[in-house]
Image (tube, helix red, strand yellow):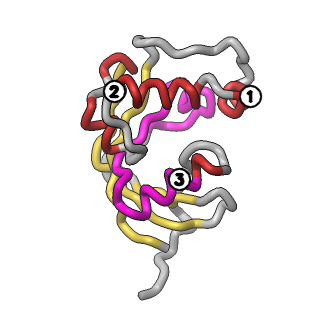
Amino acid sequence: MTTPDISALPTCEFAFPGPLRDQLVAAVLSGVKTSATGLLQDHERDDEPLPQVGDRSVVVDSDGRPVAVIEQTEVRVVRLGDVDLDHARDEGEGYDSVAAWRAGHEEYWHGPDYLGWLGDPDFTVDDDTLAVAVRFRLVQRL
């Protein structure tokens, strides 16, 4: 099988390079991870449009190597307080409750990598923080 021309596709980076990204990419490649959550403010900060159903992107690993193509199958803007258990489970990180999902994500959003990238050491999320909850399917491993 030949590798498709992926040069026109946007890049999809799960978390920051390192162990968490490696774990998330492995979950995508295994088919366990079929959803993800980011903050709406991240799209606004980078003047990046929200993904649309049908959009495809290239997942990269911690070394920036393309490893897969995924396609968005659902995109919702939701309050963090409204994220449901199905979405949390489908993130492929072993969450068995929304509370566990929330704690894991707050650890990330309140952690040094995210706060350093954001440039706001006092940032915190709450139930009303808007998130972009996406579902996707693995189209191809590269």
Give, as a three-letter code, the residue at label 1.
Gly
Q: Which residue is mark 2?
A: 98
Identify the image quadrant of the N terminus: bottom left
Q: Is residue 52 visible?
A: no
Point out residue 8 in the picture as x, y percentages from the top left corner. 53, 63
Q: Residue furthest bottom?
A: 1
Give, as a three-letter code, the residue at label 2.
Val
Q: Secondary structure at mark 1?
A: helix
Give, as a three-letter code, the residue at label 3.
Gln
Depth check, mark 3 against mark 1: the one in front is 3
> What residue is shown at x 31% (from left), y 29% (from top)?
97
Depth check, mark 1 against mark 2: the one in front is 2
Instruction: Choose the circle earlier in sequence order: 3 or 1.
Output: 3
The answer to whether 109 appears left or right of 75 in the picture is: right
Give how far apart the Cα atoms at labels 3 and 1 are: 21 Å
Point out residue 80 in the picture as x, y percentages from the top left corner. 39, 20
The answer to whether 74 appears left or right of 18 in the picture is: left
Give how far apart the Cα atoms at labels 1 and 2 are: 26 Å
> What residue is shown at x 57% (from left), y 27% (from top)?
107
Magenta stretch contains residue 93 = no
Q: Which residue is mark 1?
A: 116
Q: What residue range appears in magenta?
A: 22-50
Q: Secondary structure at mark 2?
A: helix
Q: Which residue is mark 3?
A: 23
Q: Is residue 115 above or below residue 56?
A: above
